[in-house]
Image (cartoon, rainbow, N blue to C red):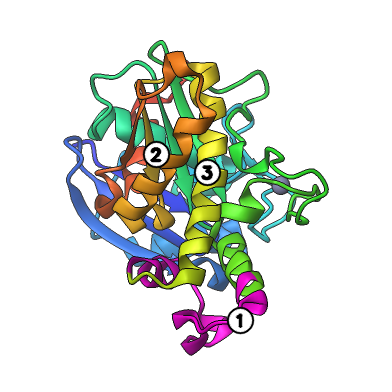
Amino acid sequence: MSNILGIDIGGTNICYGVVAEDGEFLYQNSIKTSTVASAEDLAAQIKKDLGKKHQVSGIGIGAPSANEISQSIEHAPNLEWGDIVPLKAIFEEEFDIDTYVVNDANAAAMGEKFYGEAQEMDNFVVITLGTGIGMGSYVNGNLIIGANGLAGELGHTVVRRNGRECNCGKFGCLETYIAKNGIVKTAKEKLEFSSGGSMLQSISPSNLSPAEIFKSARREDPVSLEVVDTVTRDLAFAISYLINILDPECVFLSGGISKNGNLLKRKTEKHLKSFVLPNLRDKASVKISSLNDKNSGILGAAAASRNKSGATA
Ligand SMILES: [Zn+2]
């Protein structure tokens, strides 16, 4: 028996599941992040929920701003559980089971490598699009961890000097434009300056979401189309750096916002053409992760627990 408890900690939801060796889910559940007071509280809640129903031999956790070397969450801009959260120690204390902590985007990359479409690929990038923006990459067959365990902070690369203030304390980070709140903010700004009607005006501002904006764009709502155009241009700009630097076979888009599928992919590819070096143009494909509906975060965390990722390789 080698079932693993995989946990995917996100800014909005925490999803977890018991995953068998072949990637099959034996159990799955989720908790709203805002209802969890601390990592200790999370460990206790999950343990109580699993009870004696499911025996696991390991725990893998994917979390934002997780440092694989220290096995802690460090200064996560979108979590309020303290500056340094020693996740591995907290879960091992609660469960008495070997626990491995991995950056959430690296978990997504490992999920793609072990259970998704990247099983035959040595060079690929996974970008997670949600409350925050993360990135996990394999180069020449190895997951990139970095000297300090912090590689892949794509969301906090600056795309506009003196731009929007970010939760990390800087200004103009990519995440302030293309993560969930950034997209909604752009829509609100454009609505303020639009003279004509927009489908988005029928939605109360507090209910405005990327899903609604993409839905209206598909119905040719001009303001929504403008928002999607701005978002995909910024995303393509960031991807072009990755393609120019890493020369990957494929860039997978994963996470909640990537569920906007073809429209997101098509517009991003269109903008990419003008940013990527001609030699590399059309070489790397952009794909929506096929693991999206299976919760790649949980699968990836389970894969990380089984394979202990690149930090210890
Ligand atoms: Zn930032």
Q: How far from the left and from the top, in percent, is residue 161?
A: 79, 43
Residue drawn at 51 percent across, 84 percent down: 197
Residue drawn at 57 percent across, 83 percent down: 205
The numbered mark, 2 or 1, whose residue comes first in the sequence reads 1
Quarter assignment of residue 86: top right
C-alpha distance separating marks 2 and 1: 30 Å
Q: Which mark is residue 195?
A: 1
Q: Residue furthest front?
A: 196
Q: Which mark is residue 235?
A: 3
C-alpha distance separating marks 3 and 1: 27 Å
Quadrant the N terminus occupies = top left
- Residue 309's place in the image compared with 90, above or below, is above
Which amino acid does the dot numbered 1 rest on?
Answer: Ser
Q: Nearer the viewer, mark 3 or mark 1?
A: 1
Q: Nearer the viewer, mark 2 or mark 1?
A: 1
Q: Is mark 2 within 8 Å of ligand 1?
A: no
Q: Residues within 10 Å of mark 2 (few under 14, many from 20)?
A: many
Residue 99 in view of the camera:
no
Tell me where the magenta segment starts and ends, as one range: 190-218
C-alpha distance separating marks 2 and 3: 10 Å
Q: Name the residue carrying label 2.
A: 269
Which amino acid does the dot numbered 3 rest on?
Answer: Leu
